[in-house]
Amino acid sequence: MSIFTWANRLIKDFDWKDIAATKLSVAFFILAIAKLWPGILGLEWYWYGILFVAFAIKPFAKMFKQGKNPTPAQIQG
């Protein structure tokens, strides 16, 4: 079993609070790296924007894929 298969099995048991805590822990870890390695913050602002868009394309495309997600009316019952 690969580490990715193992992680995918574990994450299925997460609720929204677990996922939010994971995101916050990663954000604070990145802030700690930026504090310890000041050179990383020396990039121009647009590089951060480019990296954000590059890494956000696939998750957003998957999230908004036509016909895959329920409509608000279907969620409410």
Image: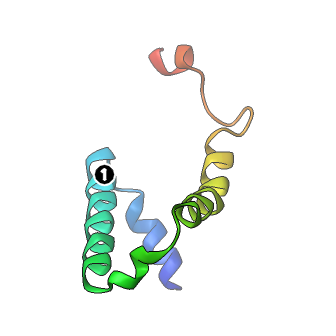
Q: Is residue 71 left or right of residue 41?
A: right
Q: Residue at x 26, y 85 (%)?
A: 36
Q: Is residue 28 left or right of residue 3?
A: left
Front-lying residue, 9 or 19: 19
Instruction: Name the spot of residue 3 as percent of width and height, x first.
Output: 48, 83
Q: Residues within 10 Å of mark 1 (few under 14, many from 20)?
A: few
Q: Is residue 70 left or right of residue 37?
A: right
Q: Is residue 9 above or below residue 56?
A: below
Q: Please, what secondary structure does the residue beneath circle 1 have?
A: helix
Front-lying residue, 4 or 1: 4
Instruction: Name the spot of residue 75 as percent of width and height, x first.
Output: 49, 22
Front-lying residue, 30 or 26: 30
Q: Residue at x 48, y 14 (%)?
A: 77
Instruction: Name the spot of residue 21 as percent of width and height, x first.
Output: 25, 56
Q: Residue at x 62, y 33 (%)?
A: 69
Q: Is residue 31 above or below residue 65?
A: below
Q: Residue at x 60, y 62 (%)?
A: 55
Instruction: Name the spot of residue 4 as percent of width and height, x first.
Output: 52, 77
Q: In the rendered structure, which amino acid carries the disc numbered 1?
A: Ala
Residue 7, image quadrant: bottom left
Give the residue pinned by disc 1: 20
Q: Is residue 10 above or below residue 35?
A: above
Q: Which color scheme did the rendering employ for the protein?
A: rainbow
**Badge count:** 1
Residue 40, image quadrant: bottom left
Q: Is residue 68 above or below residue 56?
A: above
